[in-house]
Image (cartoon, rainbow, N blue to C red):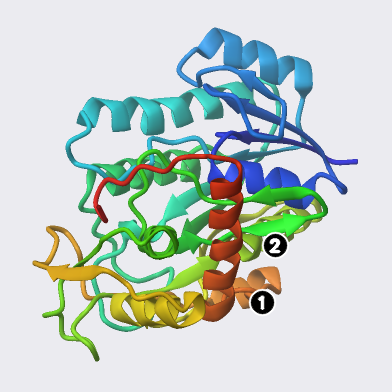
Amino acid sequence: MTKILITGSSGYIGNALWVYLKKNYIIRGLDKYNSRYLKSEKIDLLNLKKLDHYIKSYQPDIVIHLAAQSLVDETINKKKYYLNNVVATKNLIFCLKKNKIFNLIFSSTAAVYKYKNTPIKENDNLKPVSAYAKTKYECEKLIKKSNLNYIILRFFNVCSSFKIKNKIAGELHKPETHIIPTVVYKSILNKKIYIYGNTYKTKDGSCVRDYIHIQDICSAIKKCLKKMKNSNKIREIINIGSQSKITNLEILHLVKKITKSSLNYEIVKNRKGDIAYLICSISKAKKILNWKPSNSKIKKIIKDEIMWVKYLIKNNIKRTFKNYL
């Protein structure tokens, strides 16, 4: 069986990948924190000596690099983004090359693109604005210069949850900043929801986004693993989204309809940094990976998020919120 190493294995995507892939691969994880399911080695990627020793002993066939300072929050010291994203990736590349491991899948972000109000393709102009996006773009450049085999995946808005047998994987950021988990959670608990902006040039004035179900993210990564295993040389950048065009207010009203709740919400002024449209073209993913999303209809995303929220409530797992308070 192919040996996989996941960095950032205690995170949302890392836990979900283990649940999704564990039957078909030997999987180990690296993280600074404990993982919900996957037994992870507690190693900081900034500790070059420990990282090198672990990679040398495990000798993975393919590394899935998810570890990052990922909360898009400009109040975080920019040095943290640089260290945990750029330096950590530089250390990982160094250790992989030193130990003759040449296959890397990297999770990047749609935030590297310059704004446009039509579906974004991989060869469109780049203009990362946030510290998070800028450091992800620096990581991409390091990987492209590394001479490794790589697939860089630019994720759009990853969301929802799934369950396989008795294992459930879902989003539990601390704090939570994403609209779908926030609206669903607060609708069930009858807490006040704030929607940022209704003056954008969209059909209802609220932001339009492309939402991709976490299970579809996992299936795309599985396609990458197969592609990489069967390729002597591969160097690709691929968007992973759903091509959906959902507004914030559509999410709000659909959650209200599905949960049969009377939502307590208020529309407040536009949030700094938000853009009207962020929509994905997945034509390259279809062509290169023979992949397309099968779980990313917005109703399924919301229903699966409800399943996750009920699991959190049943197990008395608390959530905190940063932006959607």
Above or below: residue 123 compared with residue 317: below
Q: Nearer the viewer, residue 40 or 164?
A: 164
Q: Amino acid at mark 1?
A: Ser
Contact, CB < 8 Å: mark 1 with mark 2?
yes
Residue furthest toward the top? 49
**SS state under label 1:** loop
Marker count (numbered): 2
Circle 1 packing at 10 Å, graded few (<14), some (14-19), many (20+), is: few
Looking at the image, is mark 1 or mark 2 earlier in the sequence?
2
x, y percent for residue 298 = 51, 78
Quadrant that contains the N terminus:
top right
Determine whether, in the image, residue 265 is placed left or right of residue 312: left
Q: Position of residue 217 (x, y in %)?
A: 60, 60
User: Which residue carries the number 2 mark?
Assistant: 219
Specify the amino acid type for callout 2: Ser
**Outermost residue, bottom side:** 203
Q: Is residue 115 shown above or below 171?
A: below
Q: Is residue 21 left or right of residue 85?
A: right
Circle 2 crowding by C-alpha within 10 Å: few under 14, some 14–19, many from 20: some
The residue positioned 26% from the left and 60% from the top of the image is: 192
Q: Residue at the spot x=25%, y=75% of the render?
A: 207
Residue annotated with mark 1 = 294
In this rendering, position of residue 58 left or right of residue 17:
right
x, y percentage for residue 81?
A: 31, 32
Residue depicted at x 35% and y 76%: 262
Viewer-closest of 123 and 177: 177
Question: Is residue 231 among the parts visible in the rendering?
Answer: no
Residue 119 numbered tag:
none
Residue 191 point in image, percent of width and height: 31, 58
Asked if one can make out residue 317 in the rendered structure from this viewpoint, the answer is yes
Up-down relation of residue 285 to residue 10 (above or below): below
Task: Name the image quarter holding residue 125.
Answer: bottom left
